[in-house]
Image: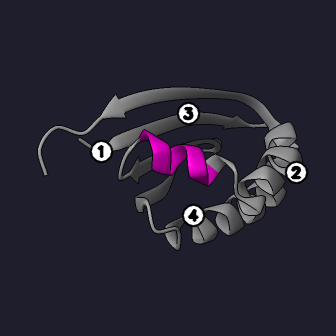
Amino acid sequence: MSFVLQVDLRIRPENVDAFMRKLAENAAAARKESGCKQFDVVVDPRDPTRAMLYEVYDDEQAFERHQQTADFKKYVAEAVPLLASRERHVWKRVGG
C-alpha cells in the first residue's frame, strides 16, 4: 500500500502569493523524486487562503527521504512560517 499525506493549509491573506511560489517550487522538486507517485496542490476557488496538498509516495520510507531533501527543508524554513495553520493527515492507499 502506498503512503499518502493530505495537508490542509490556511495561508495568511497577506502571504498568499509568496507562499504559492514557494509551494510550487517544493511540489515541482518532489514530483521528480523517485519515491513520489503524485503531488497535487489544490486551492479553494472561493478562498485563496485555503489550500490542500495530496501527496502519494511508494511507502513511508520514501516520504521520510522526501523530508530530508534540501527542497523540503527550504520549504519548511521559508514557506511554513507564512501559514496561519497546517494540519497533516496520513492515509494508506488501498489497492493499485
Q: Are marks 2 and 3 in contact (CB under 8 Å)?
A: no
For marks 2 and 1, the one nearer the N-term is: 1
Q: Main secondary structure of the magenta part?
A: helix
Report the mark closest to the observer, 4 or 2. 4
Residue 93 locus on image (x, y percent): 24, 39
Mark 1 vs 3, N-terminal side: 1
Q: Position of residue 11 (x, y in %)?
A: 74, 39
Badge 4: how crowded within 10 Å, few (<14), some, or many (20+)? many
Q: Residue at x 71, y 54 (%)?
A: 72
Image quadrant for the N terminus? Answer: top left
Side (left or right) of 2 relative to 83: left
Amino acid type assigned to the residue bearing label 3 in the image? Asp
Which residue is under mark 3?
Answer: 8
Magenta range: 60-66
Above-or-below relation of 90 to 50: above
Residue 78 numbered tag: 2
Q: CA distance from mark 2 to mark 3?
A: 18 Å
Image position of 66 (left or right of 25): left
Relative vertical location of residue 3 with respect to residue 79 in this rendering, above or below: above
Q: Tell which circle, 4 or 1, labels the residue nearer the N-terminal end.
A: 1
Residue depth check, mark 2 versus mark 3: number of the one nearer the observer? 2
